[in-house]
Image: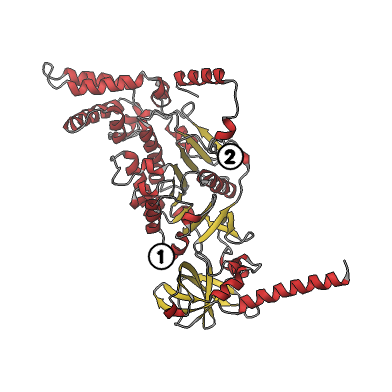
Amino acid sequence: MSDMSRHAGFDATAAATADQSENISRPIGVVRDVSGGTCVVVFDPDRLQECLVDADPSIAMSGQVSSQIKIRVGNVWLLAVVRNLRQALRAEEHGGIVAEVDFMGEGDTEKLTGNIFGFRRGVTRYPMPGALVFVSTRADLKQIYASDGRPNIGIGTVHPTRDIRAGIYIDSFLGKHFALLGSTGTGKSTSASLILHRICELAPQGHIVMIDPHGEYISAFRDKGHLLDVSNLQMPYWLMNFEEHCEVFLTSSGSDRVVDADILARCLVQSRAKNRLAAAIGKITVDSPIPYLLSDLLNILLNEMGKLDKGTGSIPYQRIRSKIEEIRGDARYQFMFSGLLVGDCMTDFIAQVFRLPSEGKPISIIDVSGVPSEITQTVVAVLSRLVFDFAVWARDEETRPILLVCEEAHRYVPNERNSDGSSVAKVLSRIAKEGRKYGVSLGLITQRPSDLAEGVLSQCGTIIAMRLNNERDQAHVRAAMPEGARGFMDAIPALRNRECVICGEGVSIPMRVAFDDLDAALRPASADPSFAEQWAKSGGEEQMIARTTQRWRAQSR
């Protein structure tokens, strides 16, 4: 390299450094109005254009929607995020750009560099109209998003930087529940896998139960998870409480259902009482998880029916008997109603599903895609209720927190408009309201937040929002977001795949994050098929149809 080129390179670097230094030191706008947690700022368009070509992406984004800026208040920096922009009227601000910004927090001024340090949430000193507005630099964001030492998991990088890590504080994230929301095709399942993998890496002795309605996550956790489906779940029917029994065994409605439920309750208590465990316990109830034989229940129904006067009122008994016999003889229900499940296997079942001990596999993936649709909600209700009831009855023991994750959560906890009063909605709502008292954390994953019960979503302390295309969904999530995150919310329709906005208890301040790439072997089987690629292939169709038909007829994979 010649002396001239070396000098030219030095001069270019020095000029870039000088430009950046100038962008940092010169204001880009001024505060016009202040009210509560927001203020109105007027930006200088020429200064924004100068910042646009800065090498620091944080400076280059200054003044754009969802970008961070800082406001000088005495010797304190006040951090704010831009919510929206509009062109000022000619008579208003001489053609400036007017922005609404939300206050995020404040930090002290580092004497040598002028950057923020010691950042903290909340505002103690508000700016006065006329206060100067400056750019937020990469160094500022590094201080703002730096971990405060609490246990955390890294899931990606803070937008617009490529090297500032985005961390989630695990205790606050799980302790107050969380929701992962995003339209189909935005990378929601892969992002959920990434978060769960990072939790498993941080806590290999953890206890996670995931309800997988489509069998997507089996491939993602083949090595780190305990995988259960209809072939090996072996969930005893007698673990159901009375309400769940009614959902499975009763087919009537209205006043007939009340009569049928009364009959089933009496006969169910008698069936449970026949077990020697009942004699050892003493008084039992219809909800007591004590094994009983279906044959005993059928015989008791027959005996009770025999006590009636000639033929009067026998129809309810016959209805219940017919449904029980139908279920007992249906091969699709054998994972739950098999005659091999009459023994007292409750302890083993709980240990297996809740990963107690975890044995290096802290997560149970329960694939319910093969469960008959008529009882899918009941199966999820039983599993969810067992998580909660176990935590309640284990309060005198050393706390063993359990994370319950529900994919397609809107199917199980629908809003009032779509509610059918199912037991699964009641138990998940109860976990959302009371679970944290007992060490039960709830993770909800859905692409339709507007179809999710509003009360349940409001209980989620951390919300991870990916791109949402539907306006109703956007409005629903916006209503659940804290006030300071509204500026980020406006960017949700424009998020790229595998980008999100995170706000709430699990993070220091709301942030826009680009998720890390996940190894192909750790991704769920949720990729969309390529029509162009698949339709270009030919051959083997007859054998494929034959194999599919065989599995279809056998009702097994």
Query: For numbered disc 2, what is the local secondary structure?
Result: loop
Examine the rendered structure and indicate whether residue 515 appears above or below residue 69: above
Q: What is the quadrant of the N terminus in the image?
A: bottom right
Residue 505 is at least partly visible in this image: no
Residue at 40 percent of width and 20 percent of height: 339
Front-most of residues 459 and 46: 46
Residue at 27 percent of width and 35 percent of height: 285
Residue 13, given in percent of the width and then of the height, sits at 75, 71
* Figure quadrant of residue 60: bottom right
Q: Amino acid at mark 1?
A: Glu
Q: Earlier in the sequence, mark 2 or mark 1?
A: 2
Coloring basis for residues: secondary structure
- Left or right, residue 434 beside residue 251: right
Query: For numbered disc 1, what is the local secondary structure?
Result: helix
Question: What is the crowding at mark 2: few (fewer than 14 residues within 10 Å), some, or many (at least 20)?
Answer: some
- Circle 1 is placed at which residue position? 483
User: Which numbered dot is residue 224?
Assistant: 2
Examine the rendered structure and indicate whether residue 327 appears above or below residue 191: above
Residue at 42 percent of width and 41 percent of height: 408
* Figure quadrant of residue 458: bottom left
Q: Which residue is situated farthest in the right direction here?
A: 2
Residue 524, given in percent of the width and then of the height, sits at 55, 39
Q: Amino acid at mark 2?
A: Lys
Residue 449, given in percent of the width and then of the height, sits at 39, 49
Q: Which residue is situated farthest in the front direction here?
A: 90
Residue 441, given in percent of the width and then of the height, sits at 44, 49
